[in-house]
Amino acid sequence: QVTLRAGAELDARRMNQYTLTLWAACPGEDEVEERLFVQVTAGQVLRCDAPFASAGGDLVQVLADTAPRTPLYAVLPQPLGGLTVSGGCPGFSLRNHDTPLMLTRQGLVLAPAGGFVPSQDTQMFRLEIEVMDRHGHNCSGTVRVEVLPSRRPRVTFLETQRDVTVPEGTGPLEVVTQVHASGDNVYYAILAPTAPALFTIDEVTGEIRSTRQLEVAHALLLVRAYNMLHPTDHATITLNITVQGTDRRVPSCVPALSVSQVPETVSPGSTLVTLRCTDPAGAEGGLRYALEGPPAARSRFHMEGPQLQVNTTLDYDSEAVAAVGFQFTATIVVTTGGQPPRSTRVPVLVTVTPVNEFTPVCPNGAAFTMPETAAFGSAVGRVVGTDRDYPLDSLEYSLEEGPGPTQPFSINTHTGEIRVVGPLDSQRHKSYQLTVRLTDTRNDLDPAKRRSRLCDVAVRLQAVPDQAPLCTPEVQELRITARLGGRQPVTRLACQGSPDGAALAYTITGGNEDGRFQLEGNTLFYLPGDLAEPRTFVLLVEVWGSPSAPRRSTVVALVVHVTPRSTPVPPSTTTPHTTLKKEPLIVVRPEAAWHPPAWFVVVLTVSGALLLATLGCMARRLLCSEQGQGLTDTFCSSRSNRDPGKLLLGKSEGGCPAGGAGRHPEALSTLSHLSSAQGQFDGRARDLRTGRDYLFNSVTGARRWI
């Protein structure tokens, strides 16, 4: 009998076969040796994990603030399925029941339903667990749960009791007070009374609000703050709420509305208005005064008791004051010192008025240069003064001495622009010294309070060299008929001299040797004489202006054709030089051109070839049927010697039907003419100018448009 040794464990994964050698011997017989083979097969054996099944068991460490029913440990036996407890139901069982921990049927160890009891000391719990499968195999082990002190902050109120006073008439859902507790995941609830009739609490913010309009009453609330994840971590506070009757009469003030107007130069600390306020209830603590309004007003004014005082300078000329329209609005709030506080409001309007503080400033280096020939109304320059008072640079300009011979200038009152209003005497004055007065306007509440300053302005005259007169045209061709009697006018010269309008002088310098022409001013006269034949005179007229040295002049050429009264005037073939310039005339002549697409040309070509072939066949049949075989042979032989271009008339190489030889010679001539017309062009090209296609003969150069 072979048995398994005590304490031995078989593992098919490590050794699945054992070979045993046995010796047997009987007295008086030989010894017998045999072998025994023991095969180990894998079976469904229930095993527990080594730490769990060890003597000390497995250790789990958790914090005391672990949420209730949180999984802490999982027992994982091998195999995982088919487990039963002693009662026959699949699962796990506890051997000891002196622990608050729970074990599920799936082998999960859970935290207590109410969580761990908070403690500053370490707590230890031991669980002895037995596991059994459906075959009765079982294993057991131990789990030790070590509960460590919590590291999170405890829910705590800074105070355990608070007195709250609420005024009578507080409306529904108005905030009465707010409680706050430190800790994590803090929520709030009212414990007592269990069904509060006057107040409710926001569980997240801790705000306590009224549920209806409050009357005089007294209420005691017990409020709990707790950790939502750990309800055992909580703290409480007691609120003693008193609804107190109030006197709704507000303070009365004189004046009830303050409107003041102050100059911009008012000094800081000046009092603008003093309120006289009384409390009808006569509450103790006096009255408190505060200023409310935009930042611009609160920065420039402040309350000193019942007095509204200036806090800083009120500069009318600054952009900040101009941005608010030179007016500041604010509200004085007068509050009583009793409970609940009662207040009244006094609107305030402060208007800042301008003060003419600054004198206008002259521009630096006010000097201008003008040509001595400047015409009447010519602009000399502009004087630009400055003034720091608001509105900025609001100035009027004037000349100390009015326009006259010694000062031929005027100035625009609003723009300061200087213009010439008289003749400039460059012989006596190389420059003019002007005195311009700058006067500010609209810079003070009183229009009579104006400031002014005198500014020196220099106008220098610049010499302008003489220019030659300009005559239009410089060459003239004239025709006159000599009349009997006195002199007759020929033409009037159109010349322009210097800009100052000086008179021009005219003289004939050439071509008037016999004295037949005379100048008076700019008019040329002809003096009649004994002229028998037509004659042409070429006159040179010199025109000059001022008699300065050197003299600048212009010469005008006059071509005068004089015809006696009895002599017929021959037609002139010369062209006058004074013709007007004509604008070029552009003539557009459209030329119609048709450019067919490529596919149309191909279709047309193929269609023409087919048509010619059809006509050729029809002509051949007619000729062959009427002329006989002789004419047919002659026609066929002559057609075979033609160039390939003539093959368009027929592609057949067969014989022709019998017929007469001389019955229709006109038909043969017509057919020969058509064939030669098609064969005389051996190329095709496109004209670059018109874009049209044409056929050409490379030998003769003949062309035909397509």
Image (cartoon, rainbow, N blue to C red):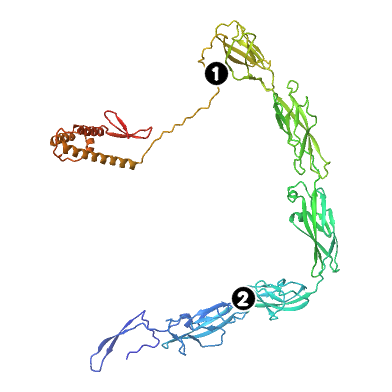
The quarter of the picture where residue 69 lies is bottom right
The quarter of the picture where residue 648 lies is top left
**What residue does disc 2 label?**
228
Q: Secondary structure at mark 2?
A: loop
- Distance between the alpha carbons at the discs numbered 1 and 2: 114 Å
Q: Which mark is residue 54?
A: none
Q: Secondary structure at mark 1?
A: loop
Residue furthest to the top: 530
Kind of residue sitting beneath label 1: His
The quadrant the N terminus occupies is: bottom left
- State the residue in front, 126 or 20: 126
Dot 1 alpha-carbon crowd within 10 angstroms: few under 14, some 14 to 19, many 20 or more:
few
Q: Are marks 1 and 2 in contact (CB under 8 Å)?
A: no
**What residue does disc 1 label?**
577
> x, y percentage for residue 621?
19, 39
- State the residue in front, 71 or 305: 305
Residue 541's place in the image compared with 605, above or below, is above
- State the residue in front, 209 or 628: 628
The quadrant the C terminus occupies is: top left
152 left or right, relative to 413: left
- Residue 383 visible in the current orientation: yes
Residue 135's place in the image compared with 342, above or below, is below
Kind of residue sitting beneath label 2: Met
- State the residue in front, 81 or 409: 409
- Residue 365 visible in the current orientation: no
Q: Earlier in the sequence, mark 1 or mark 2?
A: 2
> x, y percentage for residue 346?
81, 60
